[in-house]
Amino acid sequence: MSRPALPDDTELRDRVRGLDLDSKIRLLTGADLWRLPAEPRLGLSAVTMSDGPQGVRGTGDDPGETGLLAPAPSALAAAWDADLAERLGELFAVEARRKGVDVVLAPVVNLQRTPVAGRHFEYFSEDPLLTGTLAAAVVRGLQSRGVGACLKHFVANDSETDRTQYRARLDERTLREVYLAPFEQVLAEAEPWSVMAAYSGLDDGIEWAPMTENARLLREVLKGEFAFAGPVVSDWAATRSTVASAAGGLDLVMPGPDGPWGDALAAAVRAGEVDEQVIDDKVVRLLRLARHVGRLDEPEPAPVSSEPAPEEFRLLREVAARGTVLLRNETDLLPLSPDGIGSVALIGPNAVAPYLQGGGSAFVPAVRTVSYEEGLRAALPEDVRLTVHRGGDARLRLPYASAALLADPDSGATGVRADHQDAEGNRIGGEVRDTGDWTTYEDFAPETRRVLLRTVLTLTEPGTHRLEFGCAGRFWVSVDGEEILAGDDDRGVELVLESSHNHPPQRGIDVEVGPEGRRLALALDLTVVEAGGYGRFVTAQVRHAPPGPTPYEEIAEAAAAAQAADVAIVVVGTNEEVESEGWDRTGLELPGHQNDLVRKVIAANPRTIVVVNAGAPVLLPWADEAPVLLWAWLPGQEAGHALADVLLGRTEPSGRLPWTLPARAQDVPVPDARPRDGIVDYTEGVHVGHRAWDRDGLAPAFPFGHGLGWTRWTYESVTLSPTPVSAASLTSPAGGDGLDLTVALANTGPRAGREVVQVYLEPPRDGTDRPVRLLAGFATVQAAPGARVTAEVRVPARVFRIWDSEASQWRTPPGRYRLRVGRSSRDPHLTAEVTVDDGRLHPAV
C-alpha cells in the first residue's frame, strides 16, 4: 500500500495568500469551546466539533439536549467486526448532523497498556492491530456521511495521572511498532480528516518535547512519512507555548478565543521567529477539513430530523449484545428457555444502577436508558416473577440529597437557594434548584464572583445519618454555622483537565437524629472558578444517606432471594467513581462487597448467571465457581434489551476479549500508570498486553481473544495464497500488501453461530527481542448448525517487520515464521508456515 500524495490545493493556497496575517492567525484558535472561526473572504463557515467516543455529546447550547449513547469502544472492539464498527461510525455521523456537529473527536486509538488506566473503556484494545482495524472502520463510517473524524491522542498518551505534565519515555522501536502503529494504520486505510495532539510529552531517545511542540513526530512523521494532509488539533487547553507549538506542527489551538497564539504568534511571524508560509499551511489544512465537512463554499446544511429512528436503537442494541463475551457456560444454562422458569432474582449493585458509560469528556446525556430490570421484564413472559435486590452498595460516595429533604431558607419552597454576588458582595441574581447536585453550575451573569448556596435539611428518620460535601476551587462549607470544609485551589483550568470539578474530594459527617427529628442549616460559599475556554463555574455536591441495612444484611437478603428463585442473575461491576477520564484506578478489585455477594449467591443457587458490567478488567477471584460468566462492558443506553437478548438466546454473545483478563494483580505486566519523577517509563518495550503474558509464561484468568458462544467449531484446514510478498512490501512505510489465508471450519454444534477466526504470528527465535506471538489478522464468519464455511484472513506484511533503530528504517528479518490459527491467543487449532528469504515472503516449503 503506497502513501497517498499530499493534495495540490493550489487554489486554496492562492486564497490564503490573499488574506492578511492577522486574519490568517485568527483562524488558528477556536472561536469558542467547540467552534472554529468563520472567514467569509475565504468562503469559510464555522466548523463545529464535539466529543464522541461513546456517542456525539453535542455543544451544550441546549442544556436539555440528549443523544444516542452507544456501548463503549472496548465493547465495540469485543465484537471483532470491522463491518459492525463501520455501521456504528455511520450512525455517529447521522447523530452529529442531527446536532449540527461537523467533526467528532473520535476514535481514540491509544492502547490499553495497563488495566488501571482511567480511560481504558474509551480505548479499543491492548493490541495495535485490532485497535487500528476497528478504528479505521469507525473513521470510514463517519466520513462516508460527510462528518470528520479526529484521531486521538497522538501519541503514547496512555495514563490519566498528571496527564498534562508527564513525559512518556519509550525507545524508537517500541514507539514505531506499538504506539504509532494504530495511528499509521488508520491514516493509511481511512485517511481521517483531523488528528489531535496529546496533553503529554514524549521522549523516544531522539527528542523530548510536549506533543503540541514535537516537530519530529508532528511534522516529520505524521505530516511527512504518514502524509497526513489535515490539521493537527490540540487537546483542549494543552497548548502552552507560542513559537515552539506553531513551529512544531500544531495547526489549531482549542478551545478559544484565548490562547498562546493570536497577537503573540503574529508578533513572532513579524519578528522572523515563525515563517509566514508555516501559517499559510496551517490555514490550508483547516480549509481542507472545512471542505470535507461541507463548510467551505457551501450553504448551511439543511436541518436534520431531531428524532432518532427505531433502527438506530436496534444497532446500539446489536453492538451491545454481540460484544458481550461469554467467558464460561459450564452447565449449558445459557441460553435460557422461559419454559419451566417461574421466578428470576436479579441481584447486584449494578443490577439496580447499571454503569452505562464511563466518566469524562465521553459522557453523553442519553435520549433514553433501558435498565437490566426493564429489559428482562419486557422479554420474560408475564407469569415469570422478577425480583430485584441490590446486595449492598458498591459506591463509596453517597447519593445526592433528596429534594424532599431540602428547603429554601427564605421561602420555604423545596430546594437549595443560590445567591449570585459580585466582587463587592452585592446580590445580582439567583435561583432555587431542588437538588443537592450543583456540579459545574454556570448559570450566572458574567460579573458574578461568588455563589452562596443555602438550604435547610430536615431529617425525620431516627438513627445515624451521613452527610457528605464536595466542592472544587475556593470554597467554605458550614453546617449550623460551623465550618466543616474549606478549600483554596485557584488553579482554574487545571481543575477541568484533571476532572476535579466533576469528581471533587468529599468530606463527611455523621448526624444523630432522635424521634423528634432534626433540622440543619447548610451553607456553601463558592468562589467562581475561572477556567479559560472552559468558561466560569462553581462546583458543589450535597450528599445524604439515611439509616439503613448494612451491606452484609443486604447480601444475606439477596442470597435468600436467589435460593428461592429458579434462576439468579447477579450483575456486578464498576461505576462512575472507578472508571473515568481524569484519574487512573488504584487497583483491580471490584468495589464494595461484590465478591462476597457473588459467592453467597452462587452457593445459594447452582443456576446462577454472573454478569460483569465494567469497561476495564477487574479481578474475579470466584470466576471458576461461576456456572455462567458474561462480560457485558459499559453497554450504553440499550443495556437491558441487549442483556435480555443474550440471556434468552435471541442474540449470540459472540464477543471475544480485546484485552487480557488477569487472575492475580501481581501478574499484570504493567501494574500502574503513575509517573515517577514526571516520567512514565515504557520498560516493557514491544511486549504490550497479551504479548507480555506470553513472554512471561503467565496464566491469566482468560486470555486475549477468548470467548465462547452457543455452538462448537471445528477448524479443518488452512491454505496460504501462493503469491509471494515482495521485498518492497516488507520494507515500505505502510507495510505493503500481505498474505491471504483461507481457513476452512465447520459449525459442529446445535445452533447457528458466529466465530472470530484469529491468526497469530510467531517469529523465528533469532536472538532479536520479539513477541512470542502477536495478532496478525482476524475474520468473522457465520454458519448454520452442521454447515461448513471459509474465512478469508489478510495478514498484512507490516506484522512481519521490525524497526531498525540504527538504520532508522523498517526491515523484515529472514527465517521461518509460524502462523497459528485459532480461537484465542492461547487456543491454536491450525498452523501454517512462511519463509522470508531473498527479501521475499512466501509459503514455507
Image: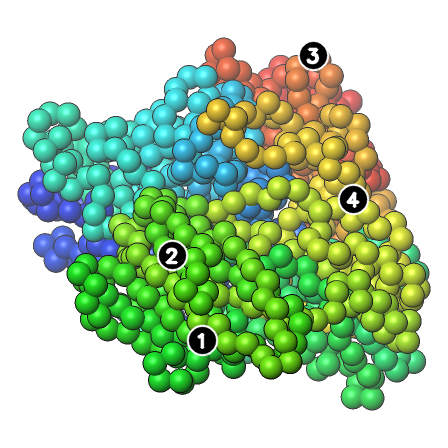
Separation (CA) of disc 1 from disc 3: 72 Å
If you read the primary sequence from the N terminus, does the residue marked by circle 1 or circle 2 appear first?
A: 1
**Residue type, numbered disc 3:** Gly
Mark 1 against mark 4, which lies toward the viewer? 1
How far across and down, in percent of the image, does residue 691 sit? 69, 31
Tag 1 residue: 456
Classify residue 549 as left or right of residue 362. right
Q: Residue 592 carries which label?
A: none
**Residue type, numbered disc 2:** Trp
If you read the primary sequence from the N terminus, does the residue marked by circle 1 or circle 4 appear first?
A: 1
At a point 46% along the width and 21% down the height, the residue shown is 204
If you read the primary sequence from the N terminus, does the residue marked by circle 3 or circle 4 appear first?
A: 4
Tag 2 residue: 476
At a point 16% along the width and 28% down the height, the residue shown is 274
Tell me whether the residue at label 1 lies in contact with that at label 2, contact meaning CB atoms closer than 8 angstroms.
no
Mark 3 against mark 4, which lies toward the viewer? 4
**Residue type, numbered disc 4:** Phe
At a point 13% along the width and 30% down the height, the residue shown is 268
If you read the primary sequence from the N terminus, does the residue marked by circle 1 or circle 3 appear first?
A: 1
Separation (CA) of disc 1 from disc 4: 52 Å
Q: Nearer the viewer, residue 4 or 799?
A: 799
Q: Which of 654 and 627 is in front in this view?
A: 627
Q: Which mark is residue 702?
A: 4
Separation (CA) of disc 2 from disc 4: 49 Å
Q: Is residue 266 visible?
A: yes
Quadrant hosting residue 389: bottom right
Q: Residue 767 carries which label?
A: 3
Classify residue 584 as left or right of residue 549. left
If you read the primary sequence from the N terminus, does the residue marked by circle 2 or circle 4 appear first?
A: 2
Separation (CA) of disc 3 from disc 4: 29 Å
Separation (CA) of disc 2 from disc 3: 63 Å
